[in-house]
Amino acid sequence: MSRRSRSSATLAAVLMLATARADAAADVAHIFWKDLRPATQAVAEDANLPMIAAKLPDHGETLSLNLQDKTVQLAGYALPVDREGDLVYQFLLVPWTGACSHMPTPPPNQIVLVTPAHPYRMAEAYQPVSVTGVLKPGMETSQLFILDGVLIVQSGYTVRKAEVTEVDSVPDAVTLPVNSPWNFLNKKKN
């Protein structure tokens, strides 16, 4: 094979790979937390969502099935479930800092159990991340070890073999009430 033929073959392979990656990226649905709730469920603009969900007949357990088995990208805050040092093997993705450990637990349809494709290096809990992977609705139970004991958390969705990347902010993060003692958790990056 001549040098020109090898160069052409290499260029063709690179173009095919780039096209495949672009097609895969085009198939990713960028979603927000509201997309995980049924359209009929009330919207909460702040962290009072658990109290709102508690008053619903289903307690926030109704899941949105229109995203089932679709590749999605969702930003939120990572709360480690299974970790060793700074390597995290599984975490809960939640819509606000402090959820589950410092504040009330969000309803199940606002929690995603994430298993990264590769252990994710995380310096601290509630690190803002973006998760990309196939969304599977279905109730899962996780056990969190927090300062004052063990907490059982029910999540409504899972993403396995997820690609996880750190982000600067979560575009649709639920805000903590102004008078919340947990406002220190809202970290601002300069």
Image (tube, rainbow, N blue to C red):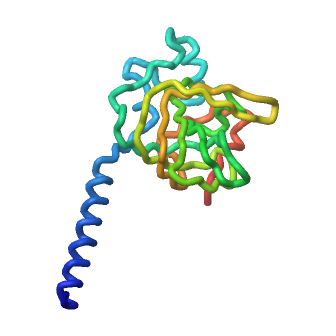
- Dividing the picture into quadrants, the one containing residue 77 is top right
Query: Number of labelled discs?
Result: 0
Image quarter hosting the N terminus: bottom left
Residue placed at 49% from the left, 26% from the top? Answer: 109
Give the x, y percent position of residue 67: 35, 33
Image quarter hosting the C terminus: bottom right
Q: Is residue 53 above or below residue 36?
A: above
The extreme top residue here reads 57
- Taking the image as shown, residue 74 lies to the left or right of residue 97, namely left
Residue placed at 60% from the left, 41% from the top? Answer: 91
The extreme right residue here reads 148
Q: Is residue 80 above or below residue 7?
A: above
Residue placed at 25% from the left, 78% from the top? Answer: 10
Q: Is residue 95 visible?
A: no
Q: Is residue 135 above or below residue 41?
A: below
Q: Is residue 10 above or below residue 82?
A: below
- Taking the image as shown, residue 79 lies to the left or right of residue 162, namely right
- Dividing the picture into quadrants, the one containing residue 52 is top right
The extreme front residue here reads 1
Give the x, y percent position of residue 71: 36, 43
Residue placed at 54% from the left, 32% from the top? Answer: 111
Q: Which residue is nearer to you in this view: 173 or 106?
A: 106
Q: Is residue 162 visible?
A: yes
- Taking the image as shown, residue 145 lies to the left or right of residue 82, namely right
Give the x, y percent position of residue 33: 46, 34
Q: Which residue is nearer to you in this view: 146 or 181?
A: 146
